[in-house]
Amino acid sequence: MLPQPRSLRFVVFIVALLSITLLLDLGGSKSYISDRVQSSPLVSTYIPPDPVSIALDGKWKEDLKTVEDFNHVFERKLEDCQSGEGPCNKNQDKVVLVAWDHCRKALKGDVQGENVWCDAMIDAIHGLGYSMLAANGPNHVYDLWRRHHASIQIIIWEYEPWGSKPCLGNSTCVYAPPGLDLPVPPPNSTHLNIPIWKVFNALWWNYSYGPLGAPFIISPEPFARWPKGNDAGKDNFYVGYSLERTCLKTPFTPFAERPSQVYVFSKLLKFFLEKLYLFPDPQGVVKNQIDDPFFADLARTDNITWFGQFKYDEMPKDSNPHQPPGITPVERMERPAFQRFVGQSKALLGIGRPFLSPTPYEALCLGVPFINPIRTWDEKDPDNRDKWGAQQDGLLYLGVDEPYVYHVKIGDRDGLARAVRKAMETPIDRFIPPHLKMSALIDRMRVLLATDWRPTAIAQMEANNFALKE
C-alpha cells in the first residue's frame, strides 16, 4: 500500500535528517566538508628549485666545452620557450650574452683568474634561470645580437680592441639616445643599434675605463670596501665570484692526516726575479733571488716539504732558469687535482705574485691557511694597514687575519718563518668569506640583470660629454 502524502513527507524528512547527521560533526561546530576543505591545500605544494642549488650543481655544463655546444643547448630551449612548444620557466625567455673571451676559455676548462670568475658568473646566471649565449669574437657577437636582440638583457664584454671598444664609440654599432623616452630601433642593414646601457665590461683590476665609466664596469672584488687611496674601482659594479661549487666537491683532508708540506704559490718562475719578491736581494740583483736559501734551510731545520709548480715562460735570457733550491717541482694539474693537492697541505705560501688570484680563497675553502706577502707600506707609518699593498689585497683590506691569513712583510725572514710554523701547527676548518658565497653572488647578479640601466647610462653620457662617431 502506497504511503499517504503526510507519511511520504515524514519519510523524506527522516532521510534528510540522516544525511545531515552524516555530514555534520554533531559533537562540534565544524562540518565534515569544512574539515576537508581546511585540511586540503588550496595552492600547489610545488617548490621551485633554489637558485643557489642550481648554481652549485654544475653537471648541466660538464659536456658543454665549446661555444657551439653551449649555444646549441640554450638556443633550443629559448626557441621552445618562445614558441610555446616546450617549458618556459622564469627568466628563460631572457638572454645574457657572455661575449668576454674569458667566458669562452672558462667553458674549455682554463683556470686563469678571469676564467674562474666568468665560470662562477655563468653558474649564477644559470641559477637565476636566464638563457645564455657565448661568442667567438666581435662578429659572432653582432650576429647573435641580430638574431636575439629582442631577448638580450645585457652583454658581458671587455673594453679592448678585440672586444667592445670598436663598438662602443661607433654609431653603427651602439644606440645611445640623448633622452630616456626614445624607442630603441631594431638592427637593420647598416646599424646594429645595441643599446649602450646593455654593454658591461668585465675588468679584473682596481680601476675603471670605457665611455660610460665605472657603473658599466663589473669587478671581481668589492673595491668600494677597500681603504681610501686604494679604491680606484670603488664605483664599479661589484659582481664578484664564488668558489663553492668546485672547492666543496673536494674532500676535506683532516689536519692530522696531512703531511708536513707547504705549497709555494707562483704560476711563473719569473715572479722569483721581481723587485718586490718575498726576499728582495740586498744588492738589487734580482737573478740571485731564485737561489735564496730560505726554503732549503727551513726544509732542513723544520722538516718541511715545499712543493711548487712554475712555468718558465717570459724568463730573462741571462737568468739561468732552474727550480729554486728546496722546492720540489710538481707536474701541471687540472683544477680538481690541484685543489686536492693544495687541500693536503698545511699552508699556502705566496711569494708576491700573482695579484688578486682566486687560489688563496680556494685554499681557505679547503681548510688551508694562506701566508700573504705585504709588498709595500708607508715607511713613516709602517703599521697602518690601509697603506699596505699585498699579494692578495682582498684578504688584507677585508680584515681576514690569523689563523686563516698571515700577513708578512717581504724581507722579514724571521717573521715569515714564525708564520709558516704557526700556520702548520694551527688547524682551521673550511672558511668562505661571506661575499664569496654563491648566495651572495646570486643576489648581486640578480640586481645586475633586473635593473633598468638606461637612466644611469644617460647620466654618464652627460657627465662624460660622450658622443658617438658617425
Image (cartoon, helix red, strand yellow):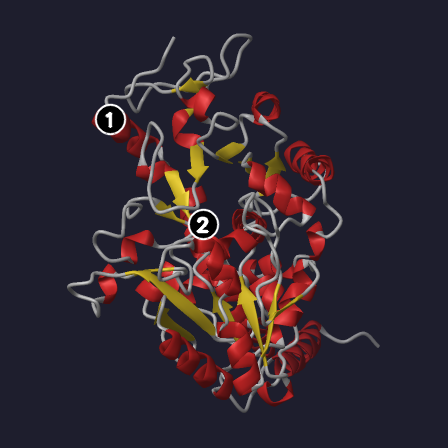
Q: Please report the residue visible at 21 percent of the width from the left and 28 percent of the height from the top.
A: 463
Q: Is residue 186 left or right of residue 68?
A: left
The type of residue carrying mark 2 is: Arg
Q: Where is mark 2, residue-wise?
A: 446
Q: Please report the residue visible at 68 percent of the width from the left and 36 percent of the height from the top.
A: 67
Q: Residues within 10 Å of mark 1 (few under 14, many from 20)?
A: few
From where the camera sits, is residue 63 visible? yes
Q: Quadrant of residue 307?
A: bottom right
The x, y position of residue 282, in whole percent, is 35, 62
Element marked by disc 2: helix
The x, y position of residue 313, in whole percent, is 60, 46
Q: Is residue 194 above or below residue 19?
A: above
Element marked by disc 1: loop
Give the foreground label among 1 and 2.
1
Q: Is residue 391 above or below residue 462?
A: below
On the rendered image, what quadrant is the C terminus found in?
top left
Q: Earlier in the sequence, mark 1 or mark 2?
A: 2
Q: Where is mark 1, residue-wise?
A: 464
Mark-to-mark CA distance, 1 and 2: 28 Å
Contact flag, marks 1 and 2 (Cβ < 8 Å): no
Q: Out of 269 and 56, give the one closest to the viewer.
A: 269
Q: Residues within 10 Å of mark 2 (few under 14, many from 20)?
A: some
Q: Is residue 260 left or right of residue 435?
A: right
The circle on residue 44 is none
The x, y position of residue 360, in whole percent, is 49, 65
The type of residue carrying mark 1 is: Asn
